[in-house]
Amino acid sequence: MFDNLAFQILEIMAVLFIFVIGIAALVVIVVYIIDVNQTRQAIRRNYPVIGHFRYIFERLGEFFRQYFFAMDREEMPFNRAQRSWVYRAAMGVDNTVAFGSTRELRTPGNVLFVNCPYPTLGQDAVEPTPLSIGPDCPNPYATASLFNISGMSYGAISRPAVLALSNGARMAGCWMNTGEGGLSPYHLQGGADVVFQIGTAKYGVRDPQGNLDADKVRDIAAHSNVKMFELKLSQGAKPGKGGILPGGKVTEEIARIRGIPAGSSSISPNRHPEVNNNGELLDMVGRIRKAAGKPVGIKFVVGAYGWLDSLCEEINRRGTEHAPDFVTVDSADGGTGAAPMPLIDDMGIPLRESLPMVVDCLIRHGLRERIRVMASGKLVTPADVAWALCIGADFVNSARGFMFALGCIQALQCNRNTCPTGITTHNQYLQHGLVAEEKAVRVCHYARSVVMEVGVIAHSCGVHAPRELRRYHARVVLPNGLSIPLNELHPDVAVASAGQ
């Protein structure tokens, strides 16, 4: 009996095996016929069936390089060492390392902070003190926050991601920028301080023709959480190009918030059509500030740097009350959800060069105390933040750092609506993995860890608080492997003027 049963099972298995082989052979034949007759890909036409492996391996190569072949300091745009630091900081676990640095300290351009022989004692350390923004506004904004969440639109990122960032920012005591996609209920729900960004399409504050609607600006400003407005001229990864949100990510809700049709790609103009010169730029800043009653700043990528001097001259000609309340300097190596590759790779000036240019320009024209400076673009670690403070920034904003805190694995699928971590997708199945309540805690941990370790750097340099860092507290490695003080590479304008 058992022998007959075993024989029947073997017969069934043999039939199934032959069936599977037959199906596989049929698939191979069909693929072969399709490949030899198609004209789009030469590899498939010349090497039918096996040519598909080339494309499979090319796709898998991204993941194999990330997990098996790339060294800790090799990957771009962020290497494994940077991501790992953020992950550990966000989880609130031990973030110390052992044995020695894996960073090549002699690489040209590296920044090295100079330790003081008598570091600041713990009991003498001072927490960041509040800075006021917008002295000429009816409602200026005062905050001690040092490290904040840069612009990420609802649409570019998902609902649970916005909720996690909003709640995490509130817990950490920092602000979050809405990005150019308008103000969603989820930005407000977490209770964080909010910076409302006005992009070239003016989503959320536009009239039917796409022009700025002052009444809608007043409506946005009526929310107590909205503390400032940021007029975006250009973005780090795509200067000269407006926001790009693929139609697959424009849901009914996102379309309603932005004031555009659902399902259609959201393409912003490459600049504000009504701003053609510095005078019109200051007019728009003044118009927004008058409607909002709150601080208004501008965000830009430095390119034609002579423009900065012209802008400052126009401000001084009109009077400092017409100045933007802050400037956000974005970097050519900043991030984005979608942009043309030539702009990502080849347009604009990186922050390491542009931030000193902006700070020095403001000092030359006597506007440094009037206009606050925010640095943005690939600043995710305490060393990045400390460098920006040395140069002269008042605040540092980061987007991708907080994406890593949410769990981003740098899958590079932000523009495809297929983000495996649920951060940049509106696929509800993928969003299910991102639990906003859990990730909010990680956002808070990350922000606090950065500020704490910037303090560690500051105290090692012998100052009491991070904003006391100056250019002489750091050095930059030259091509010969030796370093020079940062204040020699970028001489302090006030000192240089006094010596002339």
Image (cartoon, helix red, strand yellow):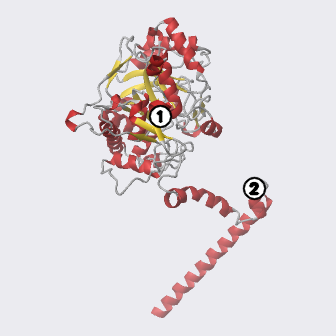
Tell me which corner region of the image, top left, top right, bottom left or bottom right, holds residue 268.
top right
Which residue: 43% across, 54% down?
A: 102
Residue nearer the viewer, 142 or 209: 142
Asked which quadrant contains residue 304, the reply is top right
Residue 90: x, y in percent? 35, 45
Furthest residue in direction top, as rendered = 318
Question: 449 or 418, which lies in front?
Answer: 449
Mark 2, Cα crowd under 10 Å, few <14 / some 14-19 / many 20+, is few
Instruction: Please indicate, yes or no, whether residue 145 appears anywhere in the rendered image.
Output: no
| SS at circle 1 | loop
The numbered mark at residue 24 is none
Disc 2 marks a residue whose amino acid type is: Gln
Q: Amino acid at mark 1?
A: Met
Left/right of residue 147 with respect to residue 314 in the rendered view? left
Residue found at the very far left of the displayed protein: 123
Reply above or below: 383 against 309: below
Residue lying at the far front in this picture: please name it: 499
The label number, if any, that marks residue 152 in the structure image: 1
Q: Is residue 18 above or below residue 226?
A: below
2 and 1 marks in contact (CB < 8 Å): no
230 in relation to 21, above or below: above
Q: Which residue is mark 2?
A: 41
Separation of marks 2 and 1 at Cα, in angstroms: 37 Å
Residue 237, position in %: x, y?
A: 56, 35
